[in-house]
Image: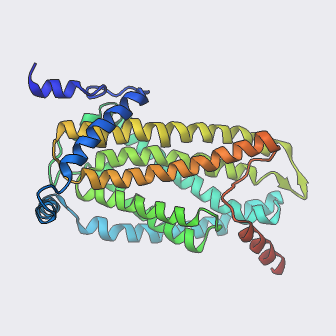
Amino acid sequence: PSRKKMAESELSYYEHSPLFPNPLSCLREIAVEGYKESYDRMPWNGARVWLSETFSWIYLSFQADWGILLLPVLVAAVITAMRMTAEACLLKRIPVWVKMDEVSAKKFPESAWKTLCYTLFWLWEIHIIFVAGDGEYFFNLRSHWEDWHPGLGIDPDIYWLYIVQVGLYYHLLYATIFLDTIRKDFMIMILHHFVTLFLIFFSYTVRFHKVGLLVLFIHDIGDVSLEFTKGVLYFKIRNGKTHFWPEFFANILFVVFALQHILFRLYWLVTKVLYSTMAVCIKVHPGGPFYLFFNLLLITLLCMQLYWFKLIVDLIVKIMVHGDHVKDTREEKNSLDNEKTALKKD
């Protein structure tokens, strides 16, 4: 066999990535290829040469346009207006109709709106990857890189998904600061939104959009299950009485959320996304552009998922050891007290 074929065969999932790849094989190959790439990327010839080569790649590969810069601003304004309209016409009225307690009534519209948004986006991503794309981007990781070149064209469905996703994260930044409940992971959430925006912009401009699409698919489902679980739990106290079934279903949904977080945001993030960007891509395009920078952003995202997984584990321990109830452990006690005080004043 040729030297290239021998190099390709070193990767366990170069030809095909199954639904459940062996994580140990993936981690080993990520470590080996990542170390080689990092070693080769170090500025052994001097910082000036290294910076010159980096800026040359930036000049050759960055392809921004007015669409990705301006259209998301309009999308963000539309999403914000739609949220305010939906809350005024329906989402704030539901708690009144079912006689929720005051704190839950204040939080329910946020969770209901986010559940709707993330569900629509995740279904859109499923359509692109598994219906229109026949699962190519999920099972054939080489497809992320084989036809890559600077200025590669972007399919219209992925292009518009990117436009609307950037607009969504502009809205989420605004909402996290000005509209939503303040939680103890406030700064982590702000960092998450900035890193995600940077990943979307960066993957668009250097045409890493195929793996970027996979990142969005892996992450959006977590927000669907989280916000839906919280929305169900808010029905627990109604008309001054505690009801059994909302908490019962919320407990089941929390188990689903925890398992989904492990599968999507930890397991598949490593075995599909990082394996693609830290192993497969190096075999397809040795010495290609921006691997280190792009992977640093993805590793930052992974670290945030590990932090949120710690919060999930902490809640599981409280439930099993101390008999606590399912709740959003990120919510600041001070913010809850402030909400209650404000509600009493109203």
> Where in the figure is residue 86, as x and y percent of width and height?
61, 64
User: Does residue 194 appear left or right of residue 147 in this picture?
Assistant: right
User: Does residue 334 appear left or right of residue 65 in this picture?
Assistant: right
> Where in the figure is residue 172, as x and y percent of width and height?
51, 65
List the single residue furthest toward the top.
Answer: 1
Q: Is residue 271 above or below residue 196?
A: above
Please tell me which residue is depicted at 58% across the width and 57% down the height of the picture: 114
Choose top left, top right, bottom left or bottom right for residue 283. Answer: top left
Quarter of the picture holding the C terminus:
bottom right
Give whichever of 195, 245 is nearer the camera. Answer: 195
Please tell me which residue is depicted at 38% across the width and 25% down the height of the picture: 18
How many callouts does the rendering have? 0
User: Does residue 282 appear left or right of residue 268 in this picture?
Assistant: left
> Where in the figure is residue 93, as x and y percent of width and height?
73, 64
List the single residue furthest toward the bottom.
Answer: 345
Q: Is residue 27 above or below residue 303?
A: above
Q: Is residue 7 above or below residue 43?
A: above
Please tell me which residue is depicted at 81% across the width and 57% down the height of the picture: 98
Please tell me which residue is depicted at 30% across the width and 53% down the height of the picture: 294
List the single residue furthest toward the left.
Answer: 2
List the single residue furthest toward the right.
Answer: 241
Give whichever of 231, 160 is nearer the camera. Answer: 231
Q: Is residue 269 above or below residue 106?
A: above
Give whichever of 127, 333 is nearer the camera. Answer: 333
Whether residue 104 is visible, yes or no, is yes
Quarter of the picture holding the N terminus:
top left
